Image: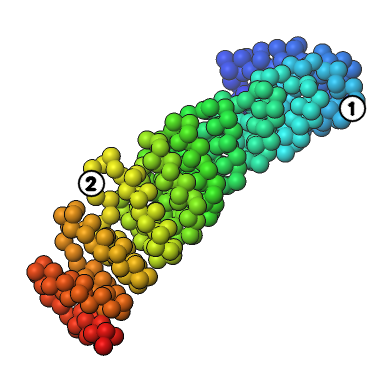
């Protein structure tokens, strides 16, 4: 159409150029539509070249599809098939391109480097499920995709909120020992957590740590909090063990305290203390106290309500040893428990320490002491 327009308006230089190009194309490939069905691989190759150069010619597309359905198509030269697949890609016939790729791949008619163009076309069209089929086929044929290809696919899956294929791609990347950008891992883990796939996220974090790949505090701490909310105490324990063993899992103080408070309210006192020791072991190298004031209050309250007076008082002494100032809630939890279990001497001793600390007792404190006296009578 462009050449006809130039002929009509008298264009000279560009018209001559286009005429020469059209003439060269006719000499090279002839008129494949008029010549009919190709009878040899050479003719088929010309047909595919014509299709590549004129990818909007629907007659050529029909002719190629007709040829591909014939049993004799297996005799076609292998260098033609990639061109055919790319021609279908340019025609936006992505589904047809994928179907032809499956047939050609199954019959072993594709060259090793013929898959990359198919991957690129599928990725552009956001067909992650079909993309994964190509990737898995390449891995089976010992022709794994490159790190850049896998990273692009993972990012595409994350953009489309496709957690299943994102996790599958990360598995392939780990098996191939690819080291991707840190943000790629972080976005994938965030997506898995948003989809409530805590097990997959934990498995991925632990696998990356074993491979010597660090993610920073943000994704690891997010995983810790999600596991705590869903009461996945087994995952929390695995994460803490790996964090103590490895330098590649970092947990921030706030997340650790939140999770420990959740554990204290859900688990027996003995298991809570085991988790407390594990949390502290993870933060030993930091040199600062891991457990904050609020978490100590929760721990003392849980131990006191469970009747573990010795444990509650031990945690209270730990607060003092670390230079922290006990709060009114800490004193009241232990005094109340001492009164309930008739340990009046301890209750009045704590009351005295409370006064010396500059904390004035309130009605709840006196009620706890009076209740202890009543029970002791």
Q: Quadrant of residue 139?
A: top right
Q: Would residue 292 appear left or right of 251 to someone viewing this image?
A: left
Helix, strand or loop at label 1? It is: loop
Give the answer, above or below, for where 9 lies relative to 203: above
Disc 2, disc 1: CB below 8 Å? no
Helix, strand or loop at label 2? It is: loop
Q: Which residue is mark 1?
A: 70
> Who is closer to the viewer here, 227 or 46?
227
Q: Measuring 27% from the left and 72% from the top, which residue is drawn there?
A: 333
Residue 87's x, y, as percent?
70, 27
> Who is closer to the viewer here, 344 or 141?
344
Q: CA distance from mark 2 to mark 1?
A: 75 Å
**Earlier residue among tags 2 and 1:** 1
Q: Measuring 44% from the left and 31% from the top, which residue is drawn there?
A: 212
Instruction: Answer yes or no: is residue 53 visible.
Output: no
Residue 272's x, y, as percent?
39, 59
Quadrant for the N terminus in the image: top right
Residue 251's x, y, as percent?
36, 46
Instruction: Answer yes or no: is residue 368 visible.
Output: yes
Q: Measuring 70% from the left and 24% from the top, which residue is drawn there?
A: 141
Q: Would residue 305 appear left or right of 114 to someone viewing this image?
A: left
Give the answer, above or below, for where 319 lies relative to 169: below
Could you classify mark 2 by the number of other residues whose Cα lies within 10 Å: few (under 14), some (14-19), or many (20 or more)?
A: few
> Who is closer to the viewer here, 338 or 92?
338
Q: Quadrant of residue 348?
A: bottom left
Which label is found at residue 176? none
Residue 47's x, y, as percent?
79, 20
Quadrant for the C terminus in the image: bottom left
Q: How many marks?
A: 2
Q: Which residue is mark 2?
A: 288
Could you classify mark 1 by the number of other residues whose Cα lies within 10 Å: few (under 14), some (14-19), or many (20 or more)?
A: few
Residue lying farthest to the front in this orientation? 377
């Amino acid at each position: 159409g462009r050449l006809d327009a130039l002929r009509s308006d008298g264009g000279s230089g560009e018209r001559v150029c286009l005429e020469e190009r059209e003439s060269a194309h006719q000499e090279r490939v002839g008129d494949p539509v008029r010549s009919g069905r190709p009878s040899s691989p050479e003719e088929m190759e010309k047909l595919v070249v014509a299709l590549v150069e004129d990818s909007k010619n629907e007659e050529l597309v029909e002719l190629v599809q007709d040829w591909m359905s014939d049993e004799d198509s297996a005799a076609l030269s292998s260098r033609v098939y990639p061109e055919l697949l790319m021609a279908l890609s340019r025609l936006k016939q992505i589904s047809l391109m994928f179907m032809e790729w499956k047939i050609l791949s199954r019959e072993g008619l594709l060259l090793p480097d013929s898959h990359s163009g198919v991957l690129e076309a599928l990725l552009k069209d956001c067909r992650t499920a079909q993309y994964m089929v190509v990737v898995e086929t390449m891995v089976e044929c010992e022709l794994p995709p490159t790190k850049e290809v896998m990273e692009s696919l993972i990012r595409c899956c994350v953009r489309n909120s496709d957690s299943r294929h994102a996790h599958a791609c990360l598995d392939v990347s780990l098996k191939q020992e690819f080291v991707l950008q840190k943000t790629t891992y972080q976005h994938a883990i965030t997506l898995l957590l948003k989809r409530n796939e805590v097990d997959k996220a934990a498995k991925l974090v632990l696998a990356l740590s074993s491979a010597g790949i660090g993610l920073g505090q943000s994704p690891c701490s997010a995983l810790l909090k999600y596991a705590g909310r869903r009461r996945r105490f087994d995952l929390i324990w695995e994460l803490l063990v790996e964090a103590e063993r490895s330098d590649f899992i970092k947990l921030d103080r706030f997340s650790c305290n939140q999770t420990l408070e959740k554990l204290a309210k859900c688990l027996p006192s003995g298991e809570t203390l085991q988790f407390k020791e594990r949390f502290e072991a993870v933060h030993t190298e930091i040199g600062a106290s891991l457990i904050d004031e609020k978490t100590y209050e929760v721990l003392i309250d849980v131990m006191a309500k469970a009747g573990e007076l010795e444990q509650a008082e031990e945690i209270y002494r730990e607060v003092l040893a670390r230079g922290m100032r006990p709060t009114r809630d800490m004193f009241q939890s232990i005094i109340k428990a001492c009164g309930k279990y008739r340990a009046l001497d301890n209750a009045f001793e704590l009351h005295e320490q409370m006064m010396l600390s500059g904390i004035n007792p309130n009605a709840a404190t006196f009620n706890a002491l009076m209740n202890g006296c009543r029970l002791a009578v």
